[in-house]
């Protein structure tokens, strides 16, 4: 069963930065659209927050994250990144990446075929 692996979470202070990574052990992400989702404590998972289609073009689905979060991909490293800057306490949550083969801009949350376990991000002073 294909699975993604996230890393890079941790504790950050408000205004700080973190970079999350999403890798795909055993398969190539080249032909996949990859997205980031977030689940805040006690809330439903939201997303996709942003995604990168297989051609590399980024799309930001959550307006409030534009300018603070940057999604990118490095196909040579088979990794998708989420750079998070100017972090706020409301950014706290479990961040998961998901992938689906092809180029998808408006795929519903339930239609993503491959998921990771998530990485925890906590923003607190």
Image (cartoon, rainbow, N blue to C red):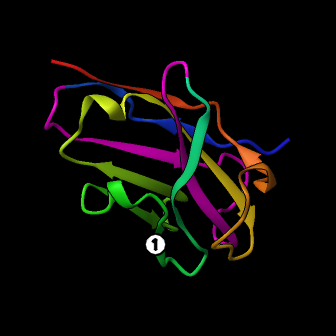
Taking 21 as reference, is 99 left or right?
A: right
Q: Quadrant of residue 48?
A: bottom right
Q: Which residue is mark 1?
A: 58
Quarter of the image where the N terminus is located:
top right
Q: Secondary structure at mark 1?
A: strand
Q: Which residues are magenta?
A: 13-42
Q: Position of residue 45 (x, y in %)?
A: 60, 36
Which residue does the image show at 72% across and 65% down from the upper left? 107
Q: x, y percentage for residue 110? A: 78, 49
Q: Determine whether, in the image, residue 66 is placed left or right of residue 59.
A: left
Q: Is residue 7 magenta?
A: no
Magenta run includes residue 25: yes
Q: Is residue 87 left or right of residue 63?
A: left
What residue do we see at 56% from left, 26% from top?
43
33 above or below 91?
below
Residue 81 or residue 94, whichever sits in front: 94
């Amino acid at each position: 069963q294909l699975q993604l692996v996230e890393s890079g979470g941790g504790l950050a202070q408000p205004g700080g930065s973190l970079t999350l990574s999403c890798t795909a052990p055993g398969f190539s992400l080249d032909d996949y659209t990859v997205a980031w989702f977030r689940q805040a404590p006690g809330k439903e998972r939201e997303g996709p927050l942003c995604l990168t289609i297989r051609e590399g073009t980024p799309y930001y689905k959550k307006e409030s994250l534009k300018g603070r979060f940057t999604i990118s991909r490095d196909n040579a490293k088979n990794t998708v990144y989420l750079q998070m800057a100017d972090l706020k306490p409301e950014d706290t949550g479990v961040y998961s990446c998901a992938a689906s083969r092809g180029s998808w801009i408006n795929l519903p949350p339930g239609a993503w075929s491959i998921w990771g376990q998530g990485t925890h991000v906590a923003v607190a002073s």
